Amino acid sequence: MPELDEVFRREAGRCTATLIRILGDIDLAEDAVAEAFAIAAEQWPAHGVPPNPGGWITTTARNRAIDRLRREATRTDRYLAANRLQSDDMEPEPNPELDDLDAFVDVVPDDQLRLMFLCCHPALAADTQVAMTLRLLGGMETPEIARVFLVPEATVAQRIVRAKRKLRDNCAPYRVPRAAELPDRLHAVLAAIYLIYTEGHTATAGPSLTRLDLSSEAIRLGRVLVELMPDEPEAVGLLALMLLTEARRSARTAADGSLVRLADQDRRRWDRSLIDEGHALVRACLRRNRPGPFQLQAAIAAVHADAQTAASTDWSQIVALYDQLYALSPNGVVALNRAIAIGELHGADAGLAALAELDAAALETYQPYHAARADLLARAGRGPAAVAAYSRAIDLSTNPTERAFLERRRHIVAVTTDRRD
Amino acid sequence: MPQYLVSVWHDDDYADIDLASPDMQRIGAQVGALNDELQQAGAWVFGAGLAPTSSATVVRAEGGEVSMTDGPYAESKEQMGGFWVIEAPDFDAALDWAGKAAAACERPVEVRPADA
């Protein structure tokens, strides 16, 4: 039943989030939601999809969970919990014909937000935060998560089991963090969503379709976050950044699947509606005058999107934005991108001079550093050095498409250097 | 209310630490202030500094026999130098206290839920 899959994608996270609040337990909530979808799979083909599928699932899941708590009420506190839950004006059996199921089960929009903050709790490692987010908010199964991150299923399963136990044993609160802790906590949520996005965007190994799913899931989560926290400019900035990057997806690869650089992309293939939406979001968040790393990255992506041709890119604007970004997050990756932009604005020698200021040792194993350096060296006419830098980048590349691109570049530089010599 | 063990960690044996040094004096004052704050907030359950593991004894009771060996249970470079047991409404509140504890001790602390 295709409707059911669609409802699952859309509603699983929301229902799980609400059930965790009601039941106070992640595992019970997951089981209850799974059971509700199983019942839907039985009943909907015969009786049709109810008018409010999400509300139906949540109500059914809640009732199943209460039934189960009663059945397994060996301990007094569980029994009390079941009674407490039942005490609101609730019918014992779900009634799909009820008009307003949402009011019936008391769905709080905040629930998904609470779950995002729980999944991205700073006491969990970053890869665990991502796995928890995909599992609980994205409704993804463990094997699916394992497949997209190319890690063994047992590893993902263990990460999730441990995280749930840790959160439970430590009595992690199920709430949106207080204002004082919000900036740090929100940053963890944004970083996890962006990690999911980039994992889907950087077509590393694995079936490309699954990767696309990951990007759209990250964008969906970003939309949920913006809807729930419209006053957080960084959340808006993240969504804008993802949309503006996503707009270039189809132009990023040629017909044969090979990688196309930003400068060489056919800009007519960029998705105008995503760009327009991203632009509007960038303008909206920058107006708040509380710039942050995601807003600035989105603004940079917006400047690229503005240029009809690569040659007409406003590089001075991009360098200025990278200056601001570096002031906020002074890390090697930002400095590298700033150097690349300087290379575009003032020429390859200026770019190489900016690169020379970076901590080369820290970037030694960072593939984009060597690729960027190779490109600048080639443009500065230093062929042999460029070939060596390309070779280093190729050694470090884990992505077949990217490696093929770098090998092609190295070949071109090597051939033209030979001719010149 | 949930309780948590907040333990303070040293990277090496701290047997010859000089308690009279300015560093230790400062840390001692900071920890004293934190203890007051914990008690005023009702979060204090217990807290203590520990003698180094060189003074530890492992005691075993097997088959009705009690035996003992000299030294710590786990031979490791890292040592727990002290701890608090605190009471906090939830994990995040416990982590707030842990942050203050790490700052007061000028060392990393470990937080573990304790089920009394």
Image: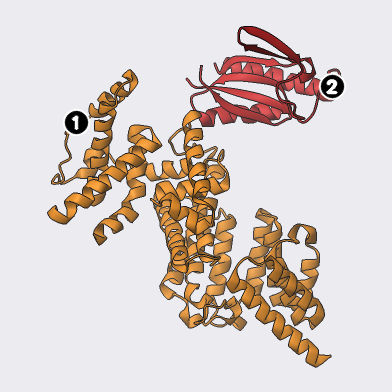
Chain A visual colour: orange
Q: Look at 79% across and 29% down and name the residue there.
A: B12
Q: In the rendering, at what x and y percent does residue A382 appear? A: 81, 81
What colour scheme was applied to this rendering of the protein? by chain
Q: Is residue B81 above or below residue A309?
A: above
Secondary structure beneath disc 2?
A: loop
Within 10 Å of the Cα at label 2, are there few (<14), some (14-19), or many (20+) other Cα atoms?
Answer: few
Tag shown at residue A137? none
* Amino acid type assigned to the residue bearing label 2 in the image: Ile
Chain on which label 1 sits: A
Subunit that carries the residue with mark 2: B
Question: Mark 2 or mark 1, which is nearer to you?
Answer: 2
Q: Which residue position holds label 1? A: A89
Which hue is chain B drawn in?
red
Helix, strand or loop at label 1? It is loop
Q: What amino acid is labelled 1 in the image?
A: Asp
Please give the residue where the numbered disc 2 appears in the rendered image. B17
